[in-house]
Amino acid sequence: MDAFIFFVFGALVLVGAFGVVLARNPVHSALWLVVTLVGVAVLFVQQDAHLLAAVQVVVYAGAIVVLFLFVIMLLGVDEPESLRDPLKAQRLAAIIIGVVLLAEVLFLTGHHWATGAKAPATDAIRGGTPGLGNNVERVARSLFTDFLWPFEITAVLLVLAVIGAVVLARRSRNAEDVAPEDVS
């Protein structure tokens, strides 16, 4: 069953990654990014990295992609544009760099240290210190006790930053809408 889940979600991650790159609409590209990130989170769960899976879904698929969508909608970049290259050699350089990186990945996968084998499952790795819970519980306990105020202050600052960005964007759009002959 582990191999089946790995291959299904590995294929889903690859399809999502190609969807991110090949989608013409930036909103569709962001949605494919969500598919990719959730697939990676499932692969983290298979490796018993539950904290990384939770962070992958909550922080990346939740917050970052919503921020991408917010910026896409705010700036209006979801309108079609021309596909002309601003730099003549940009496409050729991207293809060459991509081939070199693919060759490096293929070269590194042939070595013993890059196999991705699971670590041995021991009580010290799985449960941590007796009585303190697993890794997710320890991080949550520390975040919501010792670092509660910095966590809350950061949340408030992020909300204020979003509100400020919306106000500034609306103000600049309203200034563009008013033509000089309309003001009298």
Image (tube, rainbow, N blue to C red):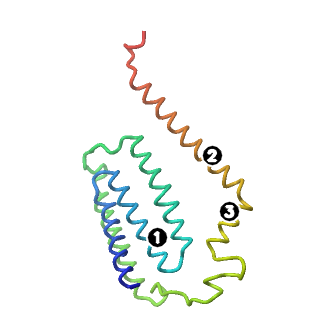
Tell me the quadrant of the picture where the C terminus can be found: top left
Question: Which is nearer the N-term, disc 1 or disc 2?
Answer: 1
Residue 143, label in figure: 3
Q: Can you tell which quarter of the image residue 181 is in?
A: top left
Residue at x 34%, y 65% (from the top left corner): 16
Secondary structure at badge 1 equals helix
- Seen in the picture, residue 101 relative to 112 is either above or below; the reply is above
Q: Secondary structure at mark 2?
A: helix
- Mark 2 surroundings within 10 Å by alpha-carbon count, few (fewer than 14), some (14 through 19), many (20 or more): few
Using the numbered discs, state the Cα–Cα distance from disc 3 to disc 2 in whole angstroms. Answer: 17 Å
In x, y percent, where is residue 143?
68, 62
Disc 3 or 1, which lies upstream in sequence?
1
Residue sitting nearer the eye, 16 or 145: 145
**Residue type, numbered disc 2:** Leu
Q: State the separation of the CA atoms marked 3 and 1.
A: 21 Å
| Total residue callouts | 3
Residue found at the far right of this picture? 146
Residue type beneath disc 3: Leu
Choose the circle earlier in sequence order: 3 or 2: 3
Residue in view at x 38 percent, y 14 percent: 182
Q: Position of residue 85 (x, y in %)?
A: 28, 51
Residue 18 found in image quarter:
bottom left
Task: Identify the residue under disc 2.
Answer: 157
Check disc 1 and give the amino acid type.
Ala
* Residue named by callout 1: 41
Crowding around mark 3 (Cα neighbors within 10 Å: few <14, some 14 to 19, many 20+) is some
Q: Are marks 3 and 1 in contact (CB under 8 Å)?
A: no
x 48%, y 57%: residue: 62
